[in-house]
Amino acid sequence: MTVRVKICGITNLKDAYAAADLGANAVGFIFYKGSKRYIPHAEARRIAEKLPPFIVKVGVFVNETIKEVLAVREFCLLDKVQLPGDSNHGSLLPDGISIVAYRIRNEKDIEKARRSPSFPLLDSGADNGYGGTGKRFDWHLLENFGRPYILAGGISAENIDEALALKPYAIDLASGVEKSPGVKDHDKMHALFRRIHR
C-alpha cells in the first residue's frame, strides 16, 4: 500500500489545493504562534471549508489547554489534533483523534514514543523548538520500532526512497517542499509525489 502523506504548515488555499490534487491524505495547520508556519484560526477554517471531503485536517498545538484544543478543533473543522510529546493531553482527548509528536534523539526517546497511548509522530525537532527544523534524526534508531508511526523531519525528494524503505504508516512533509516557511514549492511537491507514486 502506498504510504500516506501529510503536508504540514499549510497557510494558504492555493497550497492546500495543490496538496489535495497531488494526492496528500492530510494537511496540517500550525496554531503555535512561535512557528514561522503559524496560521490564524479563522484562516484555517476558511481553508478547511473548501477542501475535498476525504482530506484529513490536522491542527498542530503546543501550549493550549484541553478546552482550547477542543474549541479550536470544532471551529476549524479539524479531524485530528497533534500535540508535543511533553504534553499529557493526548490521553485526555477523545479516542482516535490525537497524534503525539516525539523529538527523537536517542533510544530513550524511541522507547517513550513506542509506549505512547496516542499515534506517534517521530521528528527531529530541537531542544528549544517543536519540529519544522528541516533536519532528520538518526533513522537507524527506528529498527524494530514495532508499531505504526508517522515519520517527519527533513524528508525531501532527495531522501524519500530511504524514508519509504523504513515502511512508515505515513510521512509528514513541511520544509522539504517549501520555498520559504509556510509557502509551498509546487515543483518540489510534484517531484516528491512522483517518487512516492512511481
Image (cartoon, grey):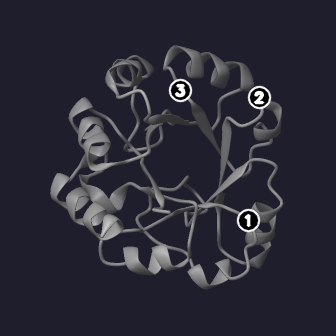
Instruction: Tell me which label, 3 or 1, sits earlier in the chain.
Output: 3
Camera-side mark, 1 or 2: 1
Q: Amino acid at mark 1?
A: Arg
As drawn, the label of residue 147 is: 1
Provide the secondary structure element on which disc 1 rests: loop
Provide the secondary structure element on which disc 2 rests: loop
Residue 51 point in image, percent of width and height: 34, 27
Give the CA distance from mark 1 to mark 2.
Answer: 21 Å
Q: Is residue 177 left or right of residue 109?
A: left
Camera-side mark, 3 or 1: 1
Q: In the figure, residue 19 lies in which quadrant? A: top left
Residue 40 point in image, percent of width and height: 40, 24
- Which residue has dot 3 on it? 78
- Which residue has dot 2 on it? 94
Between 77 and 64, the one lying in front of the other is: 77
Q: Is residue 113 above or below residue 110?
A: above
Which residue is located at x 24 percent, y 49 percent?
A: 184
- Tag 3: Cα neighbours inside 10 Å, few (<14), some, or many (≥20)? many
Q: Amino acid at mark 3?
A: Leu
Instruction: Tell me which label, 1 or 2, sits earlier in the chain.
Output: 2
Find out whether the residues at labels 3 and 1 contact each other: C-beta distance under 8 Å.
no
Instruction: Tell me which label, 2 or 3, sits earlier in the chain.
Output: 3
